[in-house]
Image (cartoon, coloured by chain):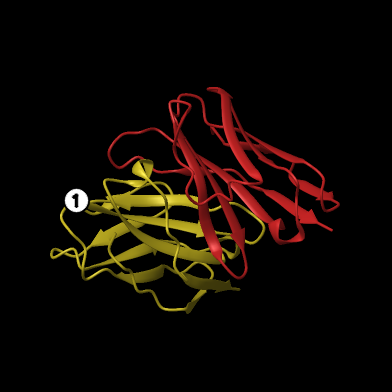
């Protein structure tokens, strides 16, 4: 699975959009991009995933560059409850086919 | 919303005791994963099952750990005998084996071995 690089920490004001970048320059054609987050004392929470196209769901939007070498997770209106560690994961065939490997992630702090 | 349910949420026991952790996957999911999370090692895959058959348990210490799926609605992870180094949070996740389908995690069992 391709390696990912994320900034170690980011801040965001409540109510503003949070844009979390992820670099995956060695991604291959069949590798999906997944985003999870982990709030303290809880299990990792699935947010969104994509292969080639941009995706949106009730939680977030995922923007994947045309060359697929990087992506951005967008939380459109961040709240204090969005404070968490966010993980970008690239995995061949999707997560149902094998283990998830979480890197260091980005600690997002949403402040009032 | 459908959820993965894990019991117990917390367990404190003495070294040498048997520990059993249980997981109820999301109904209809045919793939179940067991992970362990510690501050030092992060999230590690211990084992996973598809259609109740073990596919990979290479991450699990075989001498003391065992994982089973007695039926499609129950997965168990046992440690016997337990040791202080087994103290960690143990997560279960389930997924439907189709291209792109995500793993969904339970809230874990926080295990402390004294």
Q: Quadrant of residue B20?
A: top right
In percent of width and height, residue A32 lies at: 27, 52
Q: Name the one closer to the observer, A77 or A40.
A: A40
Question: Image quadrant for the C terminus of chain A?
Answer: bottom right
Find chain A in the image and tell me its colour.
yellow
In percent of width and height, residue A82 lies at: 54, 62
Horizontal relation, residue A25 to residue B97: left or right: left
In percent of width and height, residue B95 lies at: 43, 36
In percent of width and height, residue B91 lies at: 59, 47
Q: Secondary structure at mark 1?
A: loop
Q: Name the one closer to the observer, A95 or B64.
A: B64
- Which chain is disc 1 placed on? A
Above or below residue A67? Residue B73 is above
Q: Is residue A75 visible?
A: no
Q: Name the one closer to the observer, A44 or B55.
A: B55
Name the residue: 75% across, 55% down: B83
Q: Quadrant of residue A67?
A: bottom left
Question: Image quadrant for the N terminus of chain A?
Answer: bottom left
Q: Name the one closer to the observer, A25 or A112.
A: A25
Q: Is residue B26 visible?
A: yes
Extreme-top residue of the structure: B71
Q: Quadrant of residue A101?
A: bottom left
Name the residue: 54% across, 69% down: A14
Above or below residue A34? Residue A98 is above
For the colour red, the matching chain is B
Name the residue: 73% across, 43% down: B80
Extreme-front residue of the structure: B63
Above or below residue A20? Residue B95 is above
Horizontal relation, residue A79 to residue A31: left or right: right
How many marks overall? Answer: 1
Question: Which residue position is annotated with label 1?
Answer: A30
């Amino acid at each position: 699975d391709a390696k990912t690089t994320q900034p170690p920490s980011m801040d965001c004001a409540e109510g503003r959009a949070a844009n979390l970048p992820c670099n995956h320059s060695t991604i291959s054609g069949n590798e999906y991009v997944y985003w999870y987050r982990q709030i303290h004392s809880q299990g990792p929470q699935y947010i969104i995933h994509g292969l080639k196209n941009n995706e949106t769901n009730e939680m977030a939007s995922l923007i994947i560059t045309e060359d697929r070498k990087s992506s951005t997770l967008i939380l459109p209106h961040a709240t204090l409850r969005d404070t968490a560690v966010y993980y970008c994961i690239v995995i061949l065939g999707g997560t149902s086919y094998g283990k998830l490997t979480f890197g260091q992630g980005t600690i997002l702090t949403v402040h009032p | 919303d459908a959820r993965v349910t894990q019991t117990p949420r917390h367990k404190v026991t003495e070294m040498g005791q048997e520990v059993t952790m249980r997981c109820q996957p999301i109904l209809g999911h045919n793939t179940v994963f067991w992970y362990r999370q510690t501050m030092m090692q992060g999230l590690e895959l211990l084992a996973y099952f598809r259609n109740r058959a073990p596919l990979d348990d290479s991450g699990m210490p075989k001498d003391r750990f065992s994982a089973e799926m007695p039926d499609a609605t129950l997965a168990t992870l046992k440690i016997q005998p337990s040791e202080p180094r087994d103290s960690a949070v143990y997560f279960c996740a389930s997924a439907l084996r189709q291209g792109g389908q995500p793993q969904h995690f339970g809230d874990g069992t926080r295990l402390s071995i004294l």
